[in-house]
Image (cartoon, rainbow, N blue to C red):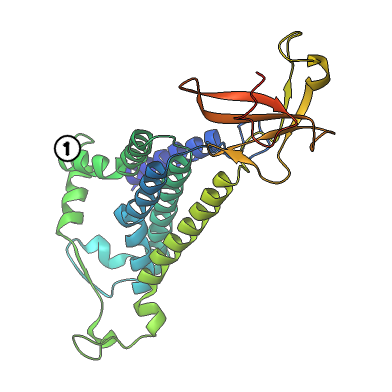
């Protein structure tokens, strides 16, 4: 028991430290730093990674199934299992659910912060490693790395069989319980999936509208770089009308949004991508002054 509790405590601690490092500690106004100008292929990999993370998380699914199925009424194996109480069964389901949900949520947070497909896969594998530490510990117990008693206990767990009482069934195919309890594990897993995908599309829409870009910047033009350079130096704010160039938000000179300076990202400036400056123009990729 104490070995299992220690392992799951380490798992939860790892995941909480990871989430704490990624959420709320950015030093920015945003809760999480989400990159801008992410390619569509990366968005596709982020969505797939989120779906796979949920269905690959055995602890999450097993916890929901075990809780709604309830404490088994028949046991085959070590006598210790026959003395199990409902509170102990629900406690184990609760611990597995917390660890599984944290793993899925950490995978999601890391996925939306990734800028390349490689980063998505690398972050996914990192969280998967943490979520499988309990399986590693159990295998080591079976091999005797933690002593004789844990080795015997792990053998008893492998040999144990849990079954529901036959009175809970009308026949072999029909359960005498509510429709919700019968499909609660499916509803729970797909509910979490729907929540995370909804959050993902919210992030996606916000990315494409420039909500995660810096909203205000300061720029200083060197004298002689453009006519009356000092007039255009100062603070610039993201476009009020949502102007974007090459999926990056444009910045307008504060106080002179209609006819002042304009900063924009251009996809082809002498064969290269670059930020450009113009004024009295709606397109920073034309009439480039700097």
Query: Which type of secondary structure does the marked residue at label 1 adopt?
Result: loop
Splitting the image into 4 quarters, where does residue 42 fall? top left
In the displayed orientation, state which residue is furthest to the bottom.
170
- 217 relative position to 273: left or right: right
Quadrant in the picture for the C terminus? top right
x then y, percent, for residue 75: 21, 69
Which of the two residues, 159 or 268, is positioned nearer the viewer here? 268
Splitting the image into 4 quarters, where does residue 166 fall? bottom left
Within 10 Å of disc 1 (Cα), the crowding (few <14, some 14-19, many 20+) is: some
Which residue corresponds to mark 1? 144
Splitting the image into 4 quarters, where does residue 20 fall? top right
Which of the two residues, 190 or 200, is positioned nearer the viewer here? 200
Residue 209 visible in rendering = yes
Q: Residue at position x 16%, y 51% from top?
A: 155
- 37 relative position to 144: left or right: right
- 124 relative position to 195: left or right: left
In the displayed orientation, state which residue is furthest to the front.
287
Q: In this view, does 2 lie above or below 286?
A: below
Q: In this view, does 8 lie above or below 236?
A: below
- 137 relative position to 99: left or right: left
x then y, percent, for residue 258: 79, 38
x then y, percent, for residue 50: 39, 51
Residue 31 visible in rendering = no
Q: Residue at position x 45%, y 63% from top?
A: 194
x then y, percent, for residue 91: 42, 59
Which of the two residues, 137 or 82, is positioned nearer the viewer here? 137
Q: How many labels does the image show?
A: 1
């Amino acid at each position: 028991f104490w070995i299992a509790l220690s392992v799951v405590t380490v798992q939860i601690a790892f995941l909480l430290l990871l989430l704490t490092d990624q959420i709320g500690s950015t030093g920015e106004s945003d809760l999480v730093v989400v990159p801008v100008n992410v390619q569509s292929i990366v968005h596709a990999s982020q969505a797939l990674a989120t779906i796979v993370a949920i269905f690959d998380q055995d602890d999450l699914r097993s916890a929901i199934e075990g809780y709604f199925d309830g404490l088994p009424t028949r046991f085959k194996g070590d006598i210790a299992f026959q003395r199990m109480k409902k509170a102990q069964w629900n406690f184990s389901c609760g611990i597995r659910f917390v660890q599984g949900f944290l793993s899925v949520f950490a995978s999601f947070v890391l996925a939306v912060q990734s800028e390349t497909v490689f980063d998505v896969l690398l972050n996914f594998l990192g969280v998967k490693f943490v979520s499988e530490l309990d399986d590693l510990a159990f295998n080591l117990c079976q091999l005797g790395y933690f002593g004789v008693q844990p080795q015997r206990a792990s053998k008893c767990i492998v040999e144990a069989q849990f079954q529901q009482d036959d009175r809970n069934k009308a026949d072999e195919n029909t359960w005498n319980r509510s429709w919700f309890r019968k499909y609660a594990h499916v509803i729970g897993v797909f509910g979490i999936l729907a929540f995370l995908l909804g959050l993902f599309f919210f992030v996606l829409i916000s990315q494409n509208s420039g909500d995660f870009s810096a909203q205000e910047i300061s720029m200083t033009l060197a004298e002689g770089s453009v006519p009356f350079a000092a007039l255009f130096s100062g603070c610039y704010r993201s476009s009020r009308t949502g102007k974007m160039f090459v999926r990056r938000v444009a910045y307008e000179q504060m106080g002179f949004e209609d006819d002042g300076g304009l900063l924009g990202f251009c996809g082809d400036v002498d064969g290269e991508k670059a930020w450009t400056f113009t004024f009295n123009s709606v397109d920073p990729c034309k009439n480039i002054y700097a």
